[in-house]
Amino acid sequence: MPSWRAAGLNKVLYRIVRSRLARCEDIHGVRSVVGELEKLGSYIAPPVGVETIIDDLAGVPCDWVTTGKAAGSRIILYFHGGGFCFASPLLHNALLARLAEMTHARGLMANYRMAPEFPFPAAAEDAFAVYEALLQQGYNANNIILAGDSAGGNLVMTTLVAAREHNLPQPAAGVLISPAIDMAVNGDSAFMLRNDDPFFDLGTLLLLRNSYLNGHNPCDPKVSPLYAELHDLAPVMLHVGSLEILQDDSVRLAAQIRRQHGLADLTIWPGMAHVFPLFYQLPESKEAIDRICQFMTQHSGQNSR
């Protein structure tokens, strides 16, 4: 059973996000509705002293996110969610700052190009370019962790696969929160949970997907990593809520990785909504973040740059 705080947030999300998203006819409307999420400050509880330092890696705008605490050589390269179409800097920077602070790492937010202005393959190209740039600057792959939520989880996986295909070293690990892995939307949960998800209705999900694909084949492994070869990749951790229409993306991805002899640590959280770790006031979120930080620490080194 979810906590009372989680149950309350689910009702709030359904009222101020899902019900309004369902009435949106284009991405501009979606962006307006999602902007309301940043008003849920009491649920987000960002750490004290969050600061961002603007940078540019391989032509991609990035932000170094910090709370001013001392950090080692570990880097968390984060790809934010938003259906490839929008960003929520307050939510995502708060999560990244917390992860970085708890793991004594430096947080790097990649502000990749978004659809519909820049459809596929823009986001995937930017994500890989930032990872490659870190390696070219001399950062040790064993100290780099890729993390992302929703669409950002997709970019974690496409970057892992692209790194292997380009004969680049794998990062230390990948962390995926409620990832969107199958653009063909073939998972049973997309239909069985379409009325239960407090965040997304199926129509909104398809609107975001179509804006990103812009007519591209949704089964292309470069856009749907569920259909890619998933061998010889970094260890992966996945967290997903049991109410999500995207739940089966995580379940099937974990199964595919394990079948190809990789490590996939999957947790399905009862009664939780899409990307719930963004809302730190939930006890489930705190537990999930603790597990994520343990995973990051376990699988990454603290060697020289």
Image (spheres, grey):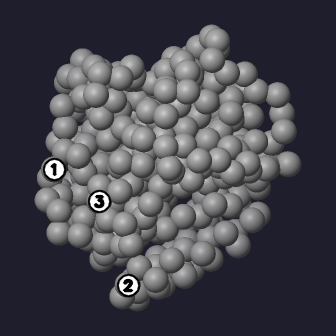
Nearer the camera: disc 1 or disc 3? 3
Task: Look at label 2 and name its amino acid.
Answer: Asp
Task: Look at label 1 and name its amino acid.
Answer: Asp
Residue pictured at 14% horizontal, 53% vertical: 219
Residue highlighted by disc 3 = 120
Residue highlighted by disc 1 = 220
26 left or right of 34 in image: left
Q: Position of residue 3 (x, y in %)?
A: 62, 53
Residue 217 appears in the rendering: yes
Nearer the camera: disc 2 or disc 3? 3
Q: Quadrant of residue 11?
A: bottom right
Which one is nearer the viewer's eye here, 59 or 106? 59
Q: Which mark is residue 26?
A: 2
Residue pictured at 27% horizontal, 38% vertical: 253
Q: Position of residue 59 (x, y in %)?
A: 50, 50
219 left or right of 127 in image: left
Mark 2 and mark 3 lie on one chain; the one further toward the N terminus is 2
- Counting other residues with Cα less than 10 Å from the Cα at mark 3, is it few (<14), some (14-19), or many (20 or more)? many
